[in-house]
Image (cartoon, rainbow, N blue to C red):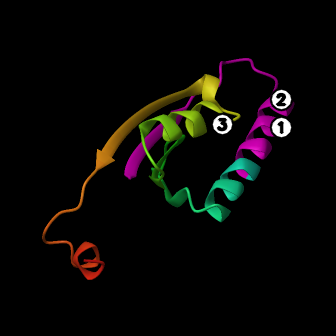
Amino acid sequence: MEFLVDISTNFPEGMDPDVIAEIKGRERERGVELMTQGQLCRIWRHPGRRSSLSLYEVADANELHGILSGLPQFPWMDIQVTPLADHPLDVSARAGS
């Protein structure tokens, strides 16, 4: 199942920059792992914001929740999830049928 995930990250004012850098490093490592495993399919930035839009392909919403809640930046994230379904006009979706 595919999910579009919109994430905004907001670290608290005054948080130690070294701690933020360490958390961001772990977040990047985890993102690479998720891409290698095929769960995180695509990721885009929102220009000028501390946010991203990602396409995940996982078994279900429970699996996605486990992935998202395990991200190093999760405590500081605002996450919006949109489940996706195939559209009959999508040529790539029809190619597999």
Amino acid type at image mark 3 = Leu
Which tag, 3 or 1, sits closer to the chain's start?
Answer: 1
**Percent from the top left, x then y, of residue 72?**
71, 34
Kindly indicate the quadrant of the structure image that contains residue 36. Answer: bottom right
The disc placed on residue 86 is none
Separation of disc 3 and disc 1 at Cα? Answer: 13 Å
Q: Which mark is residue 19?
A: 2
> Please, what secondary structure does the residue beneath circle 1 have?
helix
Residue at horizontal 62%, vertical 29%? 74
Marks 1 and 2 in Cβ contact (< 8 Å): yes
State the quadrant of the C terminus: bottom left
Which residue does the numbered mark 3 point to in the structure image?
71
Whether 72 is drawn above or below 5: the answer is above
- Quadrant position of residue 70: top right
Mark 1–mark 2 Cα distance, whole angstroms, equals 5 Å
**Which structural element holds mark 2?**
helix
Residue at image point 52% right, 40% down: 63
Q: In the image, which residues are magenta? A: 1-28
Per the image, the residue denoted by label 1 is 22
* Residue type at tag 2: Val
